[in-house]
Amino acid sequence: MGLSLERRFERYCDGIVSTLLHADREQPARWYIKGLMLPGERKSVEPMAARVQPEQVRSAHQSMHHLVADAPWSNEAMLSAVAERVLPKLIEPEDAVHWIVDDTGFPKKGRHSVGVARQYCGQTGKQDNCRVAVSLSIASERGSLPLGYQLYLPREWTDNEARLRAAGVPEEVVFKTKPALAMQQIEAALAAGFPRGVVLADAAYGDETAWRERLASHGLTYAVGVRPGTTVWWGEHQPLAERKLPGERGRPRGRLQRDERHHPITVAEVACALPGQAWRRVTWREGTSGPLRSRFARVRVRAAHRDQPRDEEWLIIEWAEGAKEPAHYWFSNLPRRMAWPEMADTVMSRWRIERDYEELKQELGLGHYEGRNWRGFHHHASLCIAAYGFLTLERLAGSKKNAARFKAPALPEGFQPRAAGADAAP
C-alpha cells in the first residue's frame, strides 16, 4: 500500500527544511508550504497560519512571519534541494530539455515595497506600478520547474542607498539588467550541473547580441526572440568585399564595411522578401484542443550588430496565414538539418512558462507576500517554488488532478484577517 498524501508531503519536506540550518525554522516552513497549497484566496502569512494551525493562530503566525521576513536562510540552497528531488523525475535521459528565461510582474501600490517602480508589467500588459522578477525554469514534455528567481531593481532603487537599506537589500546587490540577471542564473545552473537544454527567451533577452554570444561561449544551444527591426546580412544584402593582401587567408580581421549598395536589412524586411515556397505549414505536436500548427520560414543569416563578423545562424519566422505581419522572429544556433516539427516545437516551447506563472500566482500565491523587504520577497518565492515542486512530483506520479490538495480545516470562529495593505510593513 502506498504512502498517504500527508506522509509523502512530510518526506518531501524533510529534505527541503534541512536547508534552513536551524531546527526552530523547520516546523514553520512545513506549515508555510502546506498553507500555500491549501484552498484560500490569500496566501499571505496570517490567513495561512489560521488554516494550518487554527488552535494556535497567533504563535503560528509569529513563527511563520519570522521564517519569511527575518530568518537568514539561503534561497539558493532551498531551490537546489527542490531541484534535487524533482529533476530526476522530470527529466529522463532521452528527453528534449529546455531552459526557459522569463520575467513576471506583480502590480503593487505604494512605493516602499522593495523593487516597486513604474515599469512594464506583463500581468497588466502596460506600464504600471509594480515589481518584476526574473526566473529560469528547466522543462521537458513532463513539466517544468523554476531553478532561479530574483527581483529586478531599477536604477531608481540601486542609486538610492537609503532606500536600499530600508528594504534590507544586501550590500552586494547592484544594478543589473534583466538579461544580466538571467545570465547569472544560467551560469549558476551550469555550475550546478543541471541537465543542459536549449535556452529559450523572448526578444527582451534575445535581441542582445552579447547575451547570445555569451550563451554560445558556454556551449549552449539557443532559440531566442528578436525584434522586427533587428538587422542581418542575408542573400544579396552583404557587406563590401574585404580587401586582402596577397596570400592572406581567414575571416575578416575588423569591422565589416557597408555603403549605399552594401548594407544589412531588418528581419521584418527578410520576411517580406521571402518567396511563397519558403513558407511551410508546420504541425509540431498535439495540444489540449487539437494539433498545434502555424506557418514558418527559416533562412541562414548573420547578425549585423556593430558590423562585427559573425557565423551564420538560423532566422526563424512565424507568420500565420491571413495575418498582416509575422508574429515572431527568432535567432537560433539549432542544428542545420533539424526537421521542421522539432524546430517549431523547440521555439514554441517557451510559452509553457506561462503555465508555471499561472499556477504559482493563482494557486500558490506567488504574488501575495505583503511585506516590504528583500529577504521576505525572496523567501516567500522560494517556499512557493518548493510547494510547486511537490505538486509537480504528485502529477508525475500519476495522481489525480486535485490529489495533492490538502483539506483545509475550518478557520477559528470569528477570525478576520487584516486587509492586505497597499504597502504593508515587513
Image (cartoon, rainbow, N blue to C red):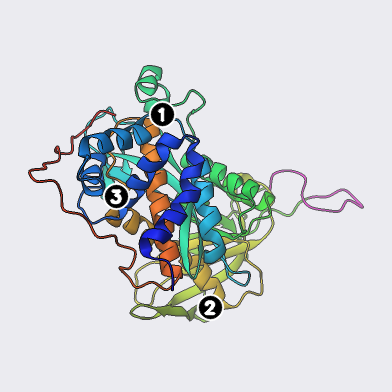
Q: Position of residue 376 (x, y in %)?
A: 36, 34
Which one is nearer the viewer's eye here, 261 or 95? Answer: 95
Q: Earlier in the sequence, mark 1 or mark 3?
A: 3
Which SS class for mark 3? helix
Which SS class for mark 1? helix
Give the labeled residue for mark 3.
Answer: 35
The residue stretch that appears in magenta: 243-256
Disc 1 marks which amino acid?
Answer: Arg
245 falls in the magenta region: yes
Disc 2 marks which amino acid?
Answer: Pro
Work out how far the residue at label 2 is from the one at label 1, CA to CA, in angstroms. 42 Å
Q: Position of residue 161 (x, y in %)?
A: 41, 18
Considering only vertical position in the picture, is 71 above or below 159? below
Q: How many marks?
A: 3
Q: Residue at x 42, y 41 (%)?
A: 26
Disc 3 marks which amino acid?
Answer: Gly
- Residue 155 image label: 1
Considering only vertical position in the picture, is 87 above or below 246? below
Of the residues tagged 3 and 2, which is closer to the observer? 3
Q: Residue at x 44, y 71 (%)?
A: 2
Work out how far the residue at label 1 is from the one at label 3, CA to CA, in angstroms. 35 Å
Which SS class for mark 2? helix
